Amino acid sequence: MCADAFGLPIDFELTGGEVHDVKAAPGFIDRLPTGGYVIADKGYDSEELRQRIIEKKSIPVIPRKSNSTIGNGDMDWGLYKYRHLVENLFARLKPFRAIATRYDKLKRNCKAMLALACSFFWLPM
């Protein structure tokens, strides 16, 4: 799930439960607009992903894992605090019962229901 600076959903992708999030991330990066910041948690720490973000003329704000030989000296912790916007987006999706309980068996149906729920956040209220 990708969110903009206001916590509104801009893109999502469904993967299997056994697929790590960093495997789906390159597709998100390719679909994002050029420039800006890409904020993610430690699970997305990979040099390949960082290079792809830099090639897109964006700045990665991803903390390195504890076993990394390069430190977090270049990390902007002030920007990293905005990572909660994606977590809050998931919390806002929970009241949609069909999504929270995963009623849909087919991927296309689940994507359609998720897209419908995400579209409600874009409506002015």
Image (cartoon, rainbow, N blue to C red):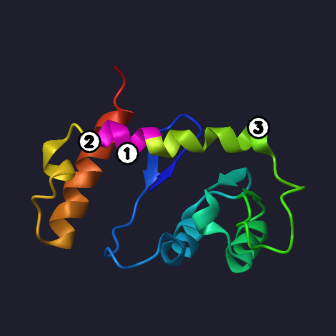
Q: Quadrant of the C terminus?
A: top left
Disc 2 and disc 1 in contact, CB within 8 angstroms: yes
Q: CA distance from mark 2 to mark 1?
A: 7 Å
**Residue visible at 14% across and 72% down in the picture:** 106
Instruction: Give the residue number, with chain letter if any, for mark 2.
Output: 94
* Residue underneath mark 1: 90
Q: Callout 3: helix, strand or loop?
A: helix
Question: Is 109 placed left or right of 60 in the picture?
Answer: left
Image quarter where the N terminus lies is bottom left
Magenta region, mostly helix, strand or loop? helix
Query: Is there a contact, CB below 8 Å, between mark 1 and mark 3?
Result: no
Please state which amino acid type lies under the numbered disc 2. Answer: Lys
Disc 1 and disc 3: Cα gap in Å?
A: 22 Å
The residue identified by callout 3 is 78
* SS at badge 2: loop
Rendered location of residue 3, percent (x, y): 51, 47
